[in-house]
Amino acid sequence: GVGNAILPLLDQHSRLMMEYTTKIRKSDKCFNENNENAPTLQAARPPQLHIHCLDFAPTAIELLQQDTRFKAAAKEGRATAHVYDLSSMHPSDICISPDTTSNS
């Protein structure tokens, strides 16, 4: 379901961001201790993700929204979850506001 697809992706992205943050902190520490130019790590920054999670089952979306990994991503603006039935509306009609959970 939607959780099996999305949660590993959120986990991987969180790990990449944590590694990036650790490298930045080490770089800043070297800069502060040695008064040298800190190397720029901007090029190594993982892309910022925003994932729209869609499922036709309201229960699947509710379970996803209860997961702590999804909650953290949603709070950071990296993920939203919506009930969506392909047969009920055109995808352009989906309201992707983080405050909505249903489009039926």
Image (tube, grey):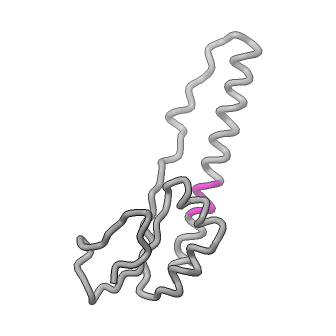
> Splitting the image into 4 quarters, where does residue 20 fall?
top right
Number of marks: 0
Instruction: Give the main secondary structure of the magenta stretch.
Output: helix
The x, y position of residue 40, in whole percent, is 56, 26
> Position of 9 compared to 96: left or right?
right
The x, y position of residue 89, in whole percent, is 24, 82
Say which residue appears at 27% left-offset and 88% top-offset.
Answer: 88
Query: In this picture, is 17 found above or below 67?
Result: above
Say which residue appears at 32% left-offset and 69% top-offset.
Answer: 95
Say which residue appears at 56% left-offset and 73% top-offset.
Answer: 65
The x, y position of residue 87, in whole percent, is 27, 89
Query: In this picture, is 81 found above or below 25?
Result: below
Query: In this picture, is 31 found above or below 86?
Result: above
Q: Nearer the viewer, residue 63 or 49?
A: 63
Q: Nearer the viewer, residue 104 or 87?
A: 104
The x, y position of residue 44, in whole percent, is 54, 38
Is 91 in the magenta? no
Q: Residue furthest right?
A: 33
Q: Nearer the viewer, residue 101 or 2?
A: 101
Q: Residue furthest front?
A: 99
Give the quadrant of the C terminus: bottom left
Residues drawn in magenta:
10-14
Say which residue appears at 69% left-offset and 18% top-offset.
Answer: 31
> Position of 33 compared to 76: left or right?
right
> Splitting the image into 4 quarters, where does residue 90 fall?
bottom left
> Position of 31 compared to 91: left or right?
right
> Splitting the image into 4 quarters, where does residue 33 fall?
top right
